[in-house]
Amino acid sequence: MDNDDHAASILGSLIEGAADAIITTDLDGLINRFNAAAEMLFGCAAPELIGQHISALVPPPRRSEFALWLRLVTQEGRALRGDTEVLGKDGQIIQTYVSMSPLKDAQGTIAGALLFCVDISARLTLQNVLQKERDLLEAILETTNDAIIMVNSARWVVSANLQFEAFFHLARYQIINQPVEVLTEQIKMRPDLPDELVNILLTFVGDAYQSAGGDFEIGGPQLRVLVWYSSPVYAHDGTNVGRLFVFRDATREREVDRMKTEFVSLVSHELRTPLTSILGFTDFILDGDAGPVDGQVREYLDIVKINTGRLIGLINDILDVTRIEAGRVDLKRSLCFIDELIDSVVQSMFLVIDSRRQQLTLKIEPDLPPLWIDRERIAQAFTNLLSNASKYSPADSELIVEARLVREPEDFAAGAPPDIFVPAIQVAVHDRGMGIAPQDQKHLFTRFYRAEQAARRQIAGTGLGLAIAKSFIDLHNGHIWFQSRLDYGSSFYFSIPLVEAE
């Protein structure tokens, strides 16, 4: 066998064993080689096609295109490639990627064409699915009421929706596929856009870990409040691909909240004035200042007094919640000893606890350091906890109040939050009452929430006491938590950190 025959034999083996479909033709386009991979792709045996024109493998609409390719390849020596269609057995259309190049003999003369064919049907199907998903996502982003912008991990703006243009009056075509600094420079040139917007973008772009949110105001003919949220975005493999910024117009919501707060405050004040008068005159009559009161009338007046006091307490709670929501609670701090505060609250509640024949035990650690607190607010929080303990416990049961100094985080009672401050004073209220069901525990500090057990037993309450207590303790950088077991009682704890007087 001479060298040419040996080379041809090797080439034939390579073509036959190739994973891709390989077809060769002569100058007239007649097929002279059709490898095993081509047989699998087209569903035809090589002998069926050898000697046939290459157009037999092409759908009629594509034949003029193939004829042009063949002429350019065999006559001008050009190599062409691209996505096209071919015909499988029984006329099946197959989406393929075809590479066609000149086939030369040993002397370098063009002797025909060499075709590589790759089935890309699955790839195109996947591309179509991905394109539909992309179109759907874009449609959602374009119709949402929130302004959305995406910055990739290289700090380039890669997406911004229509609402982003509407909110900030910044043309998308000027910022998309541009560094985020292009966007921040445009914001700086706008007097109606706040510097806070620039700070938000520059602070969190490039941060692959933390999420954050807040709000800011935008000036202009009409002041607007925007609530913002930002979070890192990850691919399916966990790779950080950038950061998403979302802005929502909360102007109307804030205005409604303000109107609601003003309305509740006005109504509450208007109700409290006559109720206070009713309570005062009821006491006046009960004291006999208006003349003798017989037993039945006294009984009726006691009911009036109790329910009037309950209404006044409810109104006061609603006013406190309104002030807390509006951020209008100003703390009047002073140095206060917790044992004195506890003693004053216990004295004020003595008659209530005694009327239920409950025993109150105090376990106060001696020589506790003073706290820098708003005495009235913390007293109210403690009152709410002690009142609940008494209210939800049976007659003749024991209530226990504890207070102690905690210097290390691990010394707090079980269930304490991990970020709790030390040193601190921990106060606890234990009861042996009805306890709290597991399904109710996660809602316990929610405003107006009543546990199912309490509602079933028709125990009076507004569902505001614990929410108010938590808010006042939070304002002192303190923490509140609890442990409870249904039918075995509850233990409520709160801590106030020790700080120096300002």
Image: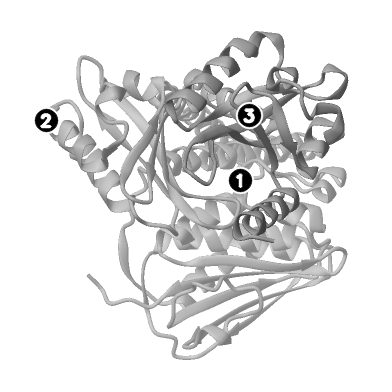
Identify the residue position indicated by label 3 in the image: 26
Height in image: 457 above or below 238? Answer: above
Residue 347: image quadrant is bottom right
* Secondary structure of the residue carrying numbered label 2: loop
Other-residue count near label 3 (Cα within 10 Å), few / some / many at <14 / 14–19 / ≥20: some
Q: Amino acid at mark 3?
A: Asp
Other-residue count near label 1 (Cα within 10 Å), few / some / many at <14 / 14–19 / ≥20: many
Q: CA distance from mark 3 to mark 2?
A: 68 Å
Q: Earlier in the sequence, mark 3 or mark 2?
A: 3
Question: Which residue is rendered at x = 75% and y = 70% of the image?
Answer: 431
Q: Amino acid at mark 2?
A: Met
Position of 74 with respect to 95 (left or right) is left
Give residue 2's position: percent from left, percent from top.
64, 60
Position of 403 with respect to 358 (left or right) is left
Height in image: 385 above or below 198? Answer: below
Quadrant containing the C terminus is bottom left
Q: Amino acid at mark 1?
A: Leu
Q: Earlier in the sequence, mark 2 or mark 1?
A: 2
Colour scheme of the rendered structure = one colour
Height in image: 121 above or below 482? Answer: above
